[in-house]
Image (cartoon, rainbow, N blue to C red):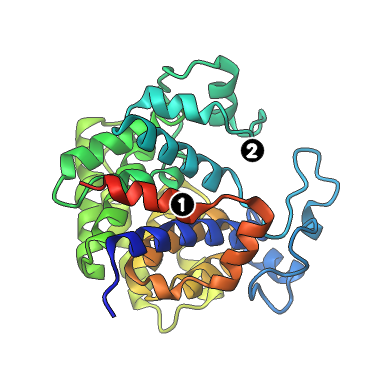
Amino acid sequence: MTVTVTGRVVGCLKGIATGDAIGKQTETLLHDEVLHWYPRGIRGFEGTPGAIIPRYARNSKHEWRIGETTDDTERTLAVARAIISERNVSHSSVGREMLRCTKSVHPGVKSLWEFHQAADPTRIARNHDGCGAAIRVAPVGVFYTSNRLDDLVNGAREAAISTHGGSLAVAAAAATAAAVSAAIDEASPQQVLEFAERAAAQAESRWPGHAAPAFATAIRSVHDQLRRLPALRPVETAACCFPNQPLTIVPLALGLATVMQSAEAAILLAANIGGDSDSVASIAGGILGAMYPSTVNDHWYTVVERVNGHDLVAVANELAQLRH
């Protein structure tokens, strides 16, 4: 059965949102702590959708709910709205939509806090190397086809710099946008990986940091470590590339997306590893959702829509019509 471009874009956004919500259950936990909270591991939504996730009960910042998506999905939709509205990617239109976002806006997340405190949609961040740009950049990969590498890299930076101006953050965003675009264009897993590396290398070359370029190398290194594992199990994966810093979070997501062939399986693996699990699950789920749309868990997506009301299919349909 032939899968249309629109079908792949729908799969991408569904993979992002389901990965985000499933992964949130274990975010920031070490692998051993995941097993403390979930002795049988994460197998999906662990509890009644809409109920507070037990480990977030009485959390002063936010009592996250089972099935609730995070700022990862909220800001992905903000980038999508900006592109749909303006028919291009500019940091000011992205900034305008981002100012409407409310999740994770507190001093503990400096990149978002500084942006919202400034309240200026044209603001350009000069620092921050986390993955907060990469998790929202998929709509750039939808907007531009994979024969437009320069546009993908420039667009990724425009979508990043409201909050993340560091070289590693921009490279991570460029790699993710490129991977999404290649996946929608039915590239092979190896081609997706290589295109992500090219985008990261180009971004690091154009907007270098204080250290030597490292992100493209990290993508290949993590991928190769995953390929050498006898089996992709949480404990071994956590031991070789635990996602807790810029050179492992997005590279792990890209590695899972180009070694595995199921959005559902990659999301569960990321959730059971811990660390920045929602980001890894979201990015890997989005890329694999574009490559293999039928592997997105439709039951999870039904829960996500019921809890959040994103109407992702409508957004995906609008974005897909703009792809060029």
- Which disc, if any, is residue 10? none
Q: Residue beneath label 2, please?
A: 103
**Label 1: few (<14), some (14–19) or many (≥20) C-alpha neighbours in 10 Å:** few
Q: Is residue 215 visible?
A: no
Q: Position of residue 161 (x, y in %)?
A: 39, 28
Percent of width and height locating residue 110: 58, 29
At x 32%, y 51%, the residue is 320
Residue at (19% x, 41% y) in the render:
202
Q: Residue furthest left?
A: 147
Q: Which badge, 2 or 1, is on the more N-terminal residue?
A: 2
Q: Quadrant of residue 92?
A: top left
Q: Residue pushed farthest right?
A: 58
Q: Amino acid at mark 2?
A: Lys
Identify the residue under disc 1.
314
- Residue 105 position (above or below residue 9): above
Of tags 2 and 1, the one toward the viewer is 1
